[in-house]
Amino acid sequence: MKLAILEDNPEDADLLIRACETWAGHSETQITCDRFSGGEAFLAHFEPGCYQMIFLDIYMEDLTGIDVAKQIRERDMDCLLVFVTTSAEHVWDSLPLHPFDYLIKPCRAERVAQVLTDAAKILPQHTASLELTCGRKKISVTYSDLISLEADRHHAIVTAAKREALRCYIDSFASLWDTLRQDSRFLLCNRGIILNMDHIEKLGENEFIMKSGQTFPIRLNNRNEVMQAFLTYQYERTRKYGKRYL
């Protein structure tokens, strides 16, 4: 597991690194910790996919942890963000950035261990990917990057983050849905339309509005069921990731 720690207080950084290394020794997990004393230095080094988890001090002198997280999310939606703070007052400001957890200073070793243990459990799912055949090429798209999939005879029109729409060959749309339905973030909102609910901006009267601005209709004959599935997912996500700072 590759970690980055953004902390401008040397003592707090040392404490957090020791806690991570202690957990790694007890869990027999190999980790690397890259340490940064400020947001600008980190962003100059950062590349999408280079870290699985990033610890961000909210109060830093050059850029706040929230500012850095916004720039991270513009380039990488996969890494897990853990905010480190002296109080919980900025928790709600950070929710649109999909934080994984919060640590209150001084960081207790048992809380750091809990965060790392939880992360180790979900990281395989977090990096799950869909193998697609587009023309003569086979490509892999992570589940987190998938936005929508629309049936087109023996093909699917796949929209993914940071890619142009792809027209990919599939055996059947039903088999594609059988694969994706195992992951709770995917929703069959209409016949031949699968959406990643993490990319939905809001629910309209009879359609979903994506963060990209696209809209997708909700199938009318099971509209209530589809809407309930979306609301339940959003509630569970907020409960799981939005209230972990105590």
Image: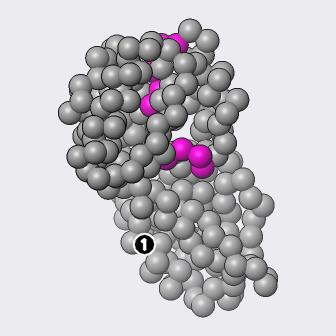
Q: Image check: 201 left or right of 161?
A: left
Give the x, y percent position of residue 33.
47, 37
Q: Who's the residue at 60% across and 22% down the image?
A: 39
Task: State the extent of the magenta-drawn residues as a range.
Answer: 49-60
Question: Within the magenta stretch, is there residue 34?
Answer: no
Q: Residue most toward the left?
A: 110
Q: Who's the residue at 49% across and 59% down the image?
A: 127
Front position in the image: 28 or 12:
28
Task: Identify the image quadrant of the C terminus.
Answer: top left
Other-residue count near label 1 (Cα within 10 Å), few / some / many at <14 / 14–19 / ≥20: some
The three-letter code of the residue at mark 1 reads Arg
Q: Who's the residue at 51% across and 85% down the image?
A: 174
Q: Image check: 227 left or right of 174?
A: left
Q: Image check: 76 left or right of 54?
A: right
Residue 1, placed above or below residue 182 = above
Residue 101, placed above or below residue 90 = below
Residue 84, placed above or below residue 2 = above
Q: Who's the residue at 74% across and 58% down the image?
A: 163
Q: Quadrant of residue 61?
A: top right
Give the x, y percent position of residue 125.
42, 61
Q: How did the renderer colour the structure?
A: one colour
Residue pointed to by mark 1: 181
Give the x, y percent position of residue 22.
27, 37
Front position in the image: 34 or 63:
34
Can residue 218 be seen? Answer: no
